[in-house]
Image (tube, rainbow, N blue to C red):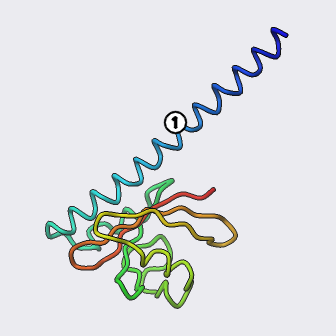
């Protein structure tokens, strides 16, 4: 009986740690996007954040409202709307306050925080399940 109690405690503790890490990851992603939106609203350009497309594990993308990617690890200059319409449809739901969206990309479930700048650019970052 004591062994079952110890195993149960370890499992519950592990779940709590995983939930805490997950919450922290969402906070990191949100802060990263929010900071970039504030900087762009303050006069920076999307290209000033080109290196953010290489941030691991939470890369940043920036696109125009019509879907043209200005910052992305591999799709700069391409239209997300043409390349992956359902992904674009979700990301286009971005608001000035920011919103979490979900979609499937290359067989993986993705959760992305997207936020619009005052000029209408969409800044996003997320994680895969």
Mark 1 residue crowding within 10 angstroms, few (<14) / some (14–19) / many (20+): few
Q: Residue furthest right?
A: 1
Front one among 51 and 111 = 111
Front one among 23 and 105 = 23
| Residue positioned 28% across, 62% down in the render | 36
- The part of the image, by quadrant, that contains residue 95 is bottom left
Q: Quadrant of the C terminus?
A: bottom right
| Residue positioned 52% across, 36% down in the render | 20
Q: Quadrant of the N terminus?
A: top right
Q: Residue furthest top?
A: 2
Residue 10 left/right relative to 56? right
Q: Residue furthest bottom?
A: 82
Residue 5 left/right relative to 68? right
Residue 18 is situated, as x and y percent measured from the top left of the image, at 59, 37
Residue 120 is situated, as x and y percent measured from the top left of the image, at 27, 79
Return the residue at label 1: 20
| Residue positioned 31% across, 72% down in the render | 116
Residue 71 left/right relative to 109? left
Front one among 6 and 41 = 6
| Residue positioned 52% across, 91% down in the render | 82
Residue 61 is situated, as x and y percent measured from the top left of the image, at 41, 70
Q: Is residue 36 above or below residue 27?
A: below
Q: Is residue 22 above or below residue 74?
A: above
Tally of numbered tags? 1
Q: Is residue 5 above or below residue 55?
A: above
Q: Secondary structure at mark 1?
A: helix
Residue 30 is situated, as x and y percent measured from the top left of the image, at 38, 54
- The part of the image, by quadrant, that contains residue 91 is bottom left
Q: Is residue 4 above or below residue 93?
A: above
């Amino acid at each position: 009986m004591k062994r079952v109690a110890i195993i149960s405690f370890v499992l519950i503790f592990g779940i709590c740690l995983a939930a805490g890490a997950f919450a922290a990851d969402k906070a990191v992603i949100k802060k990263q996007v929010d900071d970039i939106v504030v900087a762009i609203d303050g006069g920076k350009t999307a290209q000033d954040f080109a290196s953010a497309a290489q941030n691991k594990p939470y890369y940043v993308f920036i696109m125009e409202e019509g879907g043209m990617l200005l910052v992305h690890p591999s799709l700069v200059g391409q239209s997300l709307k043409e390349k992956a319409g359902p992904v674009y449809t979700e990301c286009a739901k971005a608001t000035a306050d920011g919103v979490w969206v979900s979609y499937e990309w290359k067989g993986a479930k993705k959760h992305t925080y997207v936020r619009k700048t005052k000029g209408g650019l969409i800044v996003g970052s997320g994680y895969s399940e």
